[in-house]
Image (tube, rainbow, N blue to C red):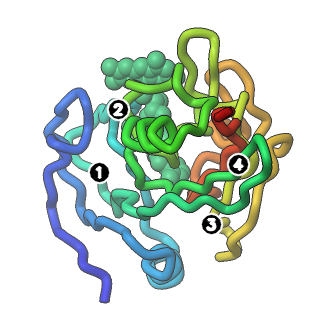
Amino acid sequence: MLNFKRNFSLKNFNTFGVNVQANYFINVKKIEEIQKIYYKYPYIPKLPLGNGSNVLFLRNYYNGIVMKIGFKGIIVMKEYDSQVIVKAFSGENWEKFVIWTIKKGFSGLENLSFIPGTVGASPIQNIGAYGSEVKDTLLEVQVYDTNNGQIRIFTKEECKLEYRHSFFKQTHVKNNFLILSVSFLLKKKITN
Ligand SMILES: Cc1cc2nc3c(=O)[nH]c(=O)nc-3n(C[C@H](O)[C@H](O)[C@H](O)COP(=O)(O)OP(=O)(O)OC[C@H]3O[C@@H](n4cnc5c(N)ncnc54)[C@H](O)[C@@H]3O)c2cc1C
């Protein structure tokens, strides 16, 4: 069952604290929920929301479905001698994820700590700080294609990561892909 909240205030879900009401609000934790929403309500506008640290609501009512992205989990997919592939689900808090990598001794994301937001939003504007950007370590992105309901992988090249920009940020594709998880290729700390 889809657990929608009606006329829900997003005041605590955007950094500017704008008291916009969402007609429908749902915290999505499973990919099946996303599939159901797009299948059952194809004509209702939908807005994926991470931590709301890069959105500015200009109206006081969003007449559609706001989907707070709540997919959680961090998985070590592959380990090599000096590198590791880590997959993080899109609802993970970015800063907590970076701290997790540091504690594990995996390097590559340290300069991006303290950037507010979620893992899922990180490739959208290719977040960056102190000369580093997500582009340096991103391997691939798993998305839900809202046009055909398929789950597919975007390679790093397909993500077209540029300075605070990506394929996903282009206006004409903005609502077409929902980011489910992001995989990173990180370095393992050398221990003697
Ligand atoms: C105080 C402050 C400091 C910041 N510092 C930096 C910085 O140093 N470097 C930097 O690069 N940025 C910085 N930012 C910007 C911000 O941290 C990033 O843009 C971050 O990636 C936003 O993440 P979010 O989860 O809050 O996204 P949101 O604001 O929730 O969403 C941003 C956009 O992405 C879409 N979206 C979110 N999640 C998904 C998903 N899973 N699938 C598809 N679409 C999605 C939303 O619909 C929206 O259009 C800063 C912001 C603040 C407020």
Q: Nearer the viewer, mark 2 or mark 4?
A: 4
Three-letter residue code for mark 4: Val
User: Which mark identifies residue 62?
Assistant: 1
Q: Earlier in the sequence, mark 1 or mark 4?
A: 1
Q: Any atom of ligand 1 within 8 Å of the CB at mark 2?
A: yes
Give how far across and how far down residue 145 sits, in percent: 67, 66
Three-letter residue code for mark 1: Tyr
* Picture layout, residue 28 above or below residue 47: below
- The mark tally for this picture is 4
Note whether residue 121 is visible: no
Alpha carbon distance from label 2 to label 4:
29 Å
Label 3: element kind:
strand
Quadrant of the image for the N terminus? bottom left
Q: Nearer the viewer, mark 3 or mark 1?
A: 3
Alpha carbon distance from label 3 to label 4:
25 Å
User: Quadrant of residue 160 in the image?
Assistant: top right
* Picture layout, residue 44 above or below residue 68: below
- Residue 69 appears left or right of 57: right
Give how far across and how far down residue 6 sits, in percent: 16, 68
- Mark 3 near mark 4, Cβ–Cβ under 8 Å? no
Alpha carbon distance from label 3 to label 1:
22 Å
Q: Earlier in the sequence, mark 3 or mark 4?
A: 4
Alpha carbon distance from label 2 to label 1:
17 Å
- Residue 91 appears left or right of 120: left
Which sits in the foreground, 129 or 28? 129
Picture quarter with ligand 1:
top left
Q: Earlier in the sequence, mark 2 or mark 3?
A: 2
At x 49% / y 54%, what residue is drawn? Answer: 90
Dot 1 crowding, Cα within 10 Å, few <14, some 14–19, many 20+: many
- Mark 2 near mark 1, Cβ–Cβ under 8 Å? no
Label 4: element kind:
strand
Q: Report the residue marked by disc 4.
A: 84
